[in-house]
Image: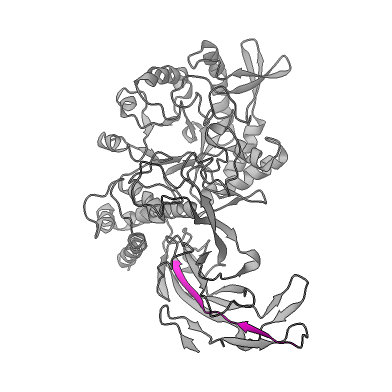
């Protein structure tokens, strides 16, 4: 035996060559064994195939707050030998000593043909098209096969840890080669015992006894039900579609902290080219007879049951007017004289008296139905129009809002809106500015302020693009705590169309539409082959930021806000803002360590 001095793991010596007999062939095969590189890194590292990433020391102690999902990455590679190996050697991974069952997923590379906008900064992994790590998929039969001179990773996480498991847990990650290889024709090759390979990596999960407070942040990443119907080629709101909808909503709150759900009472008027339509996904059944409308909400009731089951606390009703200025009405389908037809859309202006007559009947009925299904007016959010801007759109927005304001009284009206003049004019009481336009809104002292980012926020500020280092995604949690942000919005939980919904794209091949947005912008999760969502590194980094926010809130209840702010600013030069914040992974890992130490000291 010998010890790898770099990370302290025990590795069995392996002979450089070994002659074995395969399938009773009298001619022996010479097997050239390779050297391997196995070590751990943290969840904030994006493991690129061509560069050895940083590692964490063997036996590293990680503070674990119940209610979080701690994760590390197992990095592996095969070093080039003198001669090519006989064949790739599979390895199995076993995790021992953890307080819960570990889950292992392979970190897969995805094509990012549009990494960043032209107006950007130097803080990207690359500005050139590249294959980058993002997709997290279950290990194929629980095996890995190290590739020569190529670093890969396995995401190892420990979900479901509770305060009852308080204490230190010494975890061993055992990686060992298979003792046999099965060929395509069923023949087996037995690997001699002294030609097998085994290593053990160690870490400590140090579980605290304090449970995190419930999330107070209202968090929405827009859910696109039509994209699911299109991608999986199922009938909109048919049984197969409902199963997929259920599966995609399931992890939104439990894993990603998304507690507010965009709800298509009619097809959302978002990302739609003028004069065209998105696939109809409308939860409200509408019948029209003259100026009288009747409504059926059976589909909405099913939607609400699913949402309640999976912890969604707020419904976010689809926008009531067209995007970027509220000039038109959304597409709304109804039955008139027994025939289904479009009664509103691009051909109807937003200030139409006919639309007002419709809203006077629809919105009270909708709110009553939502309340019956578990979402009263305090838990139902409305939108006018997404991201209106400029003086030319101000009057349209004013007229549109006047169409609905009295009909949704008592509910929150929010809109993504970065033009401060709209707020100054009193048009929007609850604006949602982009994080690169938030400064005047913060200076105005707006209470319960929301924030968002998307394609345009590509310079200096945090975002979730695949080509960004994970700390730039995770930073939002600390910043939102620091500035008492009440809500976060992002436009794509699962948007699988190209820009303006002109065509369906394969998100595994086109991570940013048809080079419409930086890769990672349009979706948080990938669509799995089984009709279930598949996670991503940029989703996990955002999740960890939300965990940071709750961890800081816990510390505040124990020690006070001033003590928490002191730790946040420790070692950081200048005032922390959305443009100036820690970019090093070590800041975020050490922040949790410091908060854990503060809590332990305070409760002794």
| Residue 169 visible in the shown view | no
In the rendered image, residue 145, in percent from the top left (x then y), is placed at 59, 70
Taking the magenta stretch, the answer to whether it contains residue 36 is: yes
Residue 257 visible in the shown view: yes
Residue 151, position as x, y percentages in the image: 50, 67
Query: Considering only vertical position in the picture, is 559 above or below 335?
Result: below
User: In the rendered view, how is the structure colored?
Assistant: one colour
Residue displayed at 55% across by 79% down: 34
Residue displayed at 49% across by 17% down = 350
Q: Which of 331/602 is in front? A: 331
In the displayed structure, 7 sits above or below 28; it is above
Q: Is residue 218 left or right of residue 135?
A: left
Q: Quadrant of residue 282?
A: top right
Quadrant containing the C terminus is bottom left
Going 64% across and 41% down the picture, which residue do you hit? 231
Range of magenta residues: 27-41
590 falls in the magenta region: no
């Amino acid at each position: 035996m010998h010890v790898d001095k770099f990370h302290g793991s025990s590795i069995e010596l392996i002979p450089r060559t070994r002659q074995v007999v395969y399938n009773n062939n009298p001619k022996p095969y010479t097997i050239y064994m390779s050297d391997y590189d196995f070590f751990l890194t943290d969840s904030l590292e994006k493991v690129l195939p061509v560069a050895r990433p940083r590692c964490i020391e063997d036996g590293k102690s990680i503070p674990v707050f119940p209610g979080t999902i701690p994760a590390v990455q197992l990095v592996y590679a095969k070093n080039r030998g003198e001669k090519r190996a006989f064949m790739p050697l599979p390895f199995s991974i076993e995790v021992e000593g953890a307080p819960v069952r570990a889950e292992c997923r392979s970190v897969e590379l995805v094509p990012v043909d549009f990494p960043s906008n032209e107006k950007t900064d130097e803080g990207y992994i690359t500005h050139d098209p590249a294959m980058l790590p993002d997709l997290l998929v279950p290990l194929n039969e629980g095996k890995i096969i190290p590739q020569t001179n190529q670093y890969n990773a396995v995401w190892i996480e420990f979900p479901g840890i509770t305060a009852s498991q308080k204490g230190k847990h010494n975890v061993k990650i055992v990686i060992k080669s298979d003792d046999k290889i099965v060929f395509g024709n069923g023949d087996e090759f037995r690997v001699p015992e002294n030609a097998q390979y085994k290593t053990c990596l160690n870490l400590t999960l140090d579980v605290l006894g304090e449970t995190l407070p419930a999330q107070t942040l209202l968090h929405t990443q827009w859910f696109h039900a039509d994209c699911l119907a299109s991608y999986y080629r199922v009938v909109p709101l048919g049984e197969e579609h409902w199963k997929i909808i259920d599966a995609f909503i399931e992890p939104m709150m439990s894993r990603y902290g998304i507690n507010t759900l965009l709800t298509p009472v009619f097809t959302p008027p978002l990302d739609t080219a003028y004069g065209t339509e998105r696939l109809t996904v409308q939860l409200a059944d509408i019948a029209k007879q003259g100026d009288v409308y009747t409504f059926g909400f059976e589909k909405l009731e099913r939607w609400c049951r699913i949402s309640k089951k999976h912890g969604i606390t707020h419904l976010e009703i689809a926008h009531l007017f067209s995007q970027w200025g509220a000039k038109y009405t959304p597409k709304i389908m109804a039955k008139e004289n027994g025939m289904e037809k479009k009664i509103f859309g691009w051909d109807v202006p937003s200030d139409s008296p006919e639309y007002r007559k419709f809203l006077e009947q629809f919105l009270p009925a909708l709110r009553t139905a939502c309340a019956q299904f578990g979402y009263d007016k305090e838990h139902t959010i409305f939108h006018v129009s997404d991201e209106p801007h400029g003086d030319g759109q101000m009057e349209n927005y004013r007229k549109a809002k006047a169409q609905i304001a009295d009909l949704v009284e008592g509910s929150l009206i929010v809109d993504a809106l970065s033009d401060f003049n709209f707020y100054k004019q009193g048009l929007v009481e609850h604006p949602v500015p982009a994080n690169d336009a938030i400064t005047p809104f913060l200076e105005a002292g707006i209470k319960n302020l929301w924030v968002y980012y998307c394609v345009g926020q590509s310079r200096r500020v945090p975002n979730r693009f695949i080509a960004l280092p994970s700390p730039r995604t995770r930073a939002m949690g600390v910043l939102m705590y620091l500035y008492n942000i009440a809500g976060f919005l992002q436009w794509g939980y699962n948007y699988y169309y190209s820009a303006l919904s002109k065509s369906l794209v394969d998100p595994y091949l086109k991570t940013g539409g048809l080079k419409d947005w930086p890769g990672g912008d349009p979706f948080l999760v990938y669509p799995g082959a089984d009709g279930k969502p598949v996670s991503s590194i940029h989703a996990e980094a955002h999740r960890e930021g939300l965990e940071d926010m709750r961890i800081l809130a816990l510390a505040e209840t124990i020690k006070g806000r001033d003590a928490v702010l002191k730790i946040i600013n420790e070692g950081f030069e200048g005032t922390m803002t959305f443009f100036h914040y820690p970019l090093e992974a070590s800041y975020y890992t050490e922040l949790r360590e410091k908060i854990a130490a503060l809590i332990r000291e305070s409760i002794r």
